[in-house]
Image (tube, rainbow, N blue to C red):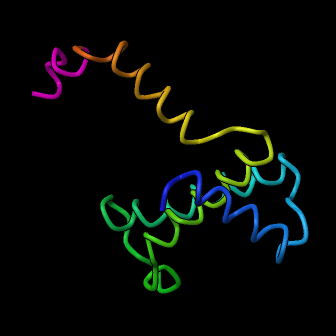
Amino acid sequence: MEIKEAQEKVDAWINATGVRYFSELTNMVILSEEVGELARIIARKYGDQSFKKSDEAYDMADEMADILWVLMCLANQTGIDLTQALESNFKKKDLRDNLRHKNNPKLK
């Protein structure tokens, strides 16, 4: 699925099932919560923390999808085409970072 199609599907779902978008502020807080849930899983799976009983049935892919969902909601609400935004971001990174990481001794 293309990003544009995903944004359109999120919008259709919101309008048909979700009644309306939550406010941008509410969605920003929800996005932060979702990122926190992913961080919790990563801290336990790859970091030094151990899983609690309530954390053992995690689904990292689902948490990442939750983040994408809310990000697409925010993009739709604010009129941002994420495909265009990502293409522009690649151009920015190509110009800014084309040698930066290759010349970083910490990455060798």
Residue 45 placement, left or right of 102: right
Residue at position x 59%, y 60% from top?
A: 6
Is residue 69 shown above or below 105? below
Which quadrant does the C terminus fall into? top left
Secondary structure character of the magenta stretch overall: loop
Q: Position of residue 40 (x, y in %)?
A: 49, 63
Extent of the magenta region: 100-108
Q: Is residue 25 above or below residue 19?
A: above
Q: Is residue 40 left or right of residue 68?
A: left
- Report x, y in % for residue 37: 56, 64
Q: Residue at x 32, y 60 (%)?
A: 48
> Does the magenta portion include 43?
no
Q: Is residue 39 above or below residue 54?
A: above
Foreground pick, 11 / 47: 11
Q: Residue at x 56, y 33 (%)?
A: 85
Q: Quadrant of residue 30?
A: bottom right
Residue 8: which quarter of the image? Answer: bottom right
Q: Is residue 73 above or below residue 78?
A: below
Instruction: Tell me residue 68's x, y (percent).
Output: 57, 57
Left or right, 32 with reference to 79: left
Residue 49: give x, y in percent of width and height: 38, 64
Left or right, residue 19 beside residue 74? right
Q: How many marks?
A: 0
User: Residue at image x 53%, y 65%?
Assistant: 65
Front residue of this view, candidates 37 and 25 = 25
Does residue 102 belong to the magenta stretch? yes
